[in-house]
Image (spheres, rainbow, N blue to C red):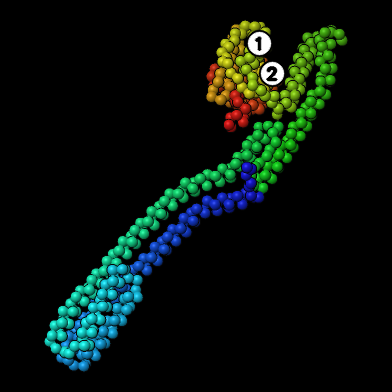
Amino acid sequence: MRLTYPRSFLSLLLIGFSIVAAPLVLALFSNAVSFERLAALSEQAVLSAVKVTQASRALTTNLAALERSARQYAVAGEATYLDAYRDNRATFLGTLRTLEEMPLSQAQRAEAVRIARQEAELDALVEKSSPSAELSMRLGAGFAPLAERTQALVALGDGVIDEGIERLRAQAEKSRTAVFWLMVAMIPTVVLLIAAFTFLIAKPINQVSASIQRLGEGEFGREIRIEGPGDMVRLGEQLDWLRERLVTLEAQKTRFLQHVSHELKTPLTALREGSDLLSSGVAGNLNADQREIARILQENSIELRKLIEGLLNYSAVHAQASYLDAKIVQLRDVVKRAVNDRKLAMVAKGIRVDFNCETVTAYCDEEKVRVVLDNLLSNAVKYSPERGVVSVKLYKDRGEAVFEVADEGPGIPVEEREKVFEVFYRGTDAPIAAIKGSGLGLSIVKEYVTLHRGHVEVLDVPGAHFRVRIPRKRENEEAA
């Protein structure tokens, strides 16, 4: 399934921040709801328990007043005490009804029913009996168990409070555990979301960076396409337009070099033929100074001809530098071909080849790799002393094929080791400068190696020692 990006990079950032923040907001909301529920439950339980306890203690006080007025009436027999008893009883019954309307436990409600029944029996005794000492004794005996029941009701209320506190503690522990596991779940979730959106954000940026790097390296053959938000896609289209424009400019430059080089060859040929005629004495005998001038013209015309041919060759090479005819190649055979092509030059200088090549295969352009090796060997033969040794190595290093070509010549100064790969650059060291060259061979090496996504370097050892690395597998195989 193809991933659909929003229309702008800013929208992608906002969506990413929102989705990453959503679990955190959800966790905060869930915690707030949990603690709000716990607080409401705590408030309700405490308020209810306090009211029940207050009513139970008030019932005990009312019972004491009721007993006192009833016994006073039994002893004195006055109507005033009877009225006081009835008022106290009304207060007691009101408190009892209030208590029964509260959310009581089963034990509390049963105790309240028993208290009401015993009080009704005592009231019947007061209303139906005449005041006497016997009545006072009977009331004392009746109110004692009733007082014990009211005290028991108070004790039950205290127990209910303790139970409520225990339930609250259990609920708080449960809420704390739920919050803990919620946070444990949130952390990896948020981390995964951050990683996912980091990938989504970084992907188009990396594609833009890679595309710009390819343009900087002169790789114009691959179309630039950026997958991402709309503004990043439009940026990719602009980069692809720039790539096409650079391809056009490069083609124009190549054609210009070819035309100029071709046009220069005609007058140069006439100049060379004229200097040859002068040197051969066709136009008359020359004195020593004139022969020296003719020789200088002849040598420089030859040198200029080599430079123009090198320029033409470089133009042809550069025109092909964005294309690879890649396939699976046995590199040992390519190295042997390159060495054999330089065999006559090596024999002429008495140069011995130290050939140390492993069996290595790579997905590459065989002809371009051969040109790379040929140019390196050409330099090695050119700068090697008589009866010197040229070392050629081939081996595998992880996912790369590595070539090394070394000679026993004067070497390359440290400050020039990067410059030698520039077009038309020739060393300034006296022994090297004495050997004329076009300055194009190593620039072609650099260009072809870069085209293979490889790397070439000059090692810091005596003599000139080049090391070339190219990937052994195609790019999609490495990604797999």
Extreme residue toward the left, this view:
133
Of 311 and 59, nearer the camera is 59
Q: What crowding class fits label 1: few (fewer than 14 Cα within 10 Å), some (14-19), or many (20 or more)?
A: few
Give how far across and how far down residue 414 sits, in percent.
Answer: 57, 24
- Say if mark 1 contacts mark 2, CB within 8 Å: no
Vertical arrangement, residue 444 with respect to residue 246, above or below:
above
Residue located at (16% from left, 89% from top): 131
Of 284 and 314, nearer the camera is 314
Q: Which residue is mark 1?
A: 340
Residue located at (62% from left, 6% from top): 350
Q: Quadrant of residue 473?
A: top right
Residue located at (77% from left, 18% from top): 305
Q: Secondary structure at mark 2?
A: loop
- Residue type highlighted by circle 1: Asn
Image quarter of the N terminus? top right
Give how far across and how far down residue 308 sits, in percent.
Answer: 76, 21
- Residue type highlighted by circle 2: Gly
Residue located at (74% from left, 25% from top): 315
| Residue 16 visible within the image | yes
Give how far across and how far down residue 122 sits, in percent.
Answer: 21, 82
Give how far across and how far down residue 15 sits, in percent.
Answer: 58, 52
Q: Which mark is residue 437?
A: 2
Extreme residue toward the bottom, this view:
79
Of 292 and 42, nearer the camera is 42
Extreme residue toward the front, this view:
128
Q: What crowding class fits label 2: few (fewer than 14 Cα within 10 Å), some (14-19), or many (20 or more)?
A: some
Horizontal side of residue 65 vs 188, given as left or right: left
Horizontal side of residue 139 vs 429, given as left or right: left
Which of labels 1 and 2 is toward the front?
Answer: 1
Spatial CA distance of label 1 from label 2 is 22 Å
